[in-house]
Amino acid sequence: MTIEEVDMKTFSATPYGRYSTDGPSNGETFRTKRLTPLLKNPEVEEVRVYLDSVRPGYEYGSSFLEESFGGLIRVEKISYDLIMKKLRIITSHEDYKLEIDGYLKKAAKRFPK
Amino acid sequence: MKSSNKKNQKKAMDRLVIEAPERLCIYDTQTFRDTIYFLNTLDYQVLVEHQCVHLDFSKTMYFSAAAALMLFAKVTRCQCSGPLIFSVNPENVVTASLPIDEKAREQMINNGLWAAIRPGGQKKLDRLWDNWKNPYKSGSNPAAEIKDVIDMLQSRFVKLPNKLIAALQEAYLNIAHHAYLNFKSEVKLPISEFMIGRWWQYAQKNKDGSIGCIVYDMGSGIPSSILSSVLFPGDDCEQIHYAMQSGNSRYDIQGRGMGFDNIKKPIEVNASAEYLLVCSGYGRIFYNKGQESERRLQTLGIQGTLIEWSFGDTEK
């Protein structure tokens, strides 16, 4: 069992957009390349996502966050319970945690197990 | 300065002269009509009649920030499209002469508008982008441009309003996803490449400490873009109101339609926030303190969407 860390700056200092048509650092790519493989890997016990290593002044847009995290349930069909068990959002901005949790809950409501 | 005006008039002899109104402003009903009529005349003469024009601002006394941004957008679209549509040098498409009124002339020069509308094409837009002292910017690839936008705004404002960067990102995404669908059809127009995703922006801190940030696109507008997704469409204000509600999107895909939550947020979370203005098609809505404070249906459309965030002194 391992703990995996995903530092946003290794993906992008300015994540932007929802789909690949929006640019290379989009939410769909972050989800499929960085989050999903780790969350679906039974050997990985915990996934820690560090949000605060982005460019100073940068703020996450809802499209990136919803596609990255809401898409885990909506698209990847990972259960809400598994995400709650394995995913840790590390940020000093409580509002991002609340926002992500909101997207996960909304997706779980629409796509129950 | 007299000789400069005379020179401009002489230059204008081989082109159509369009006289600008005394007040370029979209906030008041009367000035809104005059301003939009002036901007539409510019568009029509260049893009439809393929006519080089001279904009005569000699009688203009006042420019509002939103109207000045629209002027910048219309002029630069004509300058960049003219060469593609009727094989003219971008330097020749639109020329202009300064206001006679000293205050208006200084306002036009000092706030960067004169440099922003001067003759030139894409290279001029590139130079404007690199000049961080000029608040007029235009882009079409936000994923690559967002880094500069953040740095530019941080350099202009000592304290950037909370959630403004997130709001701008969602505004750019709305433009990319919804505004220019007509240009994305298989039949490419000469100006498609320039227009797809194109936005124009003005962000300025005023002498009194207040901050204004405006984004404008010349796409199909919210009412037109959302029309297919509502069962009983109302007037353009109703359509804008619908688009501003959480979860409403022209796409029936779960997870979409959150963008306007981000766009409203700077007005909800900053104590200095004054209003959010959304003008699109024939409608306009003012939003502040968590609710819609005014809506008005206009007699002329603005041909696209304009979003303005206004703040008082953020350093107080």
Image (tube, grey):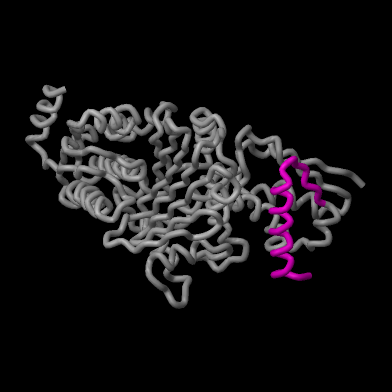
Q: Main secondary structure of the magenta part?
A: helix
Can residue B198 be seen? yes
Percent x, y of residue B6? 10, 27
* Residue shown at the point (17%, 38%) measured from the top left: B59
Relative placement, left or right, of A96 versus A42 is left
- Is residue A96 within the magenta segment? yes
* Residue shown at the point (13%, 27%) measured from the top left: B5
Percent x, y of residue B192? 35, 50
Q: Which residues are magenta?
A: A87-113
Give the vertical position of A94 relative to B133 (above or below): below
The residue nearer to you, when weighing B88 against B65, is B65
Percent x, y of residue A48? 80, 44
Specify the farthest residue to the right: A1
Relative placement, left or right, of B137 versus B119 is right
* Residue shown at the point (23%, 52%) measured from the top left: B40
Question: Which image quadrant for residue B19?
Answer: top left
Give the vertical position of B241 relative to B125 (above or below): below
* Residue shown at the point (64%, 38%) measured from the top left: A12
Question: Which image quadrant for residue B14?
Answer: top left
Question: Which image quadrant for residue B18?
Answer: top left
- Is residue A77 within the magenta segment? no
Give the vertical position of B313 relative to B44 (above or below): above
The residue nearer to you, when weighing B159 against B216, is B159
Name the image quarter holding the N terminus of chain B.
Answer: top left
Name the image quarter holding the C terminus of chain B.
Answer: top right
Percent x, y of residue B92? 19, 34
Can residue A19 be seen? no
Specify the farthest residue to the bottom: B232
Relative placement, left or right, of B307 versus B57 is right
Numbered-mark total? 0
